[in-house]
Amino acid sequence: MIDFQSRGSRGRGADENEEAEDDDGSGADDEPAGDEKTPPATADAGQVPESHDDRVGVAVVTVAVDADQSVGDAVVEELDGTGLGVATREHLAGDHDGVQQIVNRLVGRDDVDVVVTCGGVSALPDAQTVEAVHPLFDKALPGFGELFRLLYHEEVGTDVVATRATAGIADSTPVFCLPGDEAGARLGVREIVTEQAASLRTAARGSPE
């Protein structure tokens, strides 16, 4: 809410003006009403000004041959209210070179602290996300895949062995590769990414905890 300075207090009677002018001989201290400066606007209640240093910017990448954005929407919903913000969203087919190029570009962006991909981590022949992203990793994070499969087993049973969810650090940026189904993506983001993204970003950049 913008709080404007009351202008009523500036009004003075004619006698007061004449008396002020007699005191200093010039009347220079009385600013004309038209020269009043309006105080700067403040943020609306509940709206916190956002700086890049205070939040974690996440790039959400949907890897799918069709135009369905539901899994990306699910990831965005899970990020909402966690202190992680969506820096950008991308959608592309699951070809090896396309995935590699876009992830390589995203980890080089100043506003991207974490990359989350959804899709292309199954055992199907055309699932190429893992093969595309692994060469970009400076460090692999095998614990992510192990923990994800442990949690995901409760939902899909032994079918979890065909899920190749993985993570690593590429150009000082954590990259998480999740399944392309909504349940798996939500689980990975809710249970692991939102818990570890900020600390992994800090560790990857060599900053003190």
Image: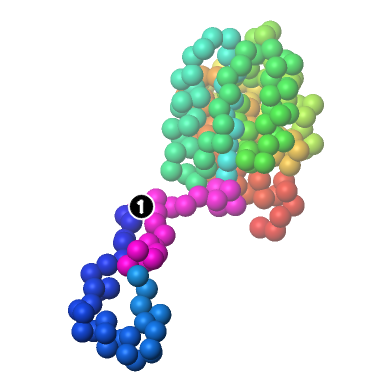
**Do we see residue 178 in this rendering?**
no
- Residue 128 pos. (x, y %): 69, 15
Q: Nearer the viewer, residue 26 or 193?
A: 26
Q: Quadrant of residue 25?
A: bottom left
Residue corresponding to mark 1: 44
Residue 81 counted in the magenta span: no
Q: Quadrant of residue 92?
A: top right
Tell me which secondary structure the magenta stretch mostly adopts: loop
Q: Is residue 20 above or below residue 124?
A: below
Circle 1 sits in a helix, a strand or a loop, which is it? loop
Q: Is residue 36 above or below residue 189?
A: below
The answer to whether 92 appears left or right of 168 in the picture is left
- Residue 8 pos. (x, y %): 23, 69
Q: Residue at x 67, y 9 (%)?
A: 126
Extreme residue in the bottom direction: 23
Boundaries of the magenta span: 33-55
Residue type at mark 1 is Asp
- Residue density around tag 1, few if under 14, some if 14–19, many if 20 or more, within 10 Å: few
Residue 41 counted in the magenta span: yes
- Residue 27 pos. (x, y %): 37, 82
* Quadrant for the C terminus in the image: bottom right
Q: Residue at x 39, y 66 (%)?
A: 35
Q: Is residue 22 above or below residue 80?
A: below
Q: Quadrant of residue 167?
A: top right
Q: Residue at x 68, y 37 (%)?
A: 109
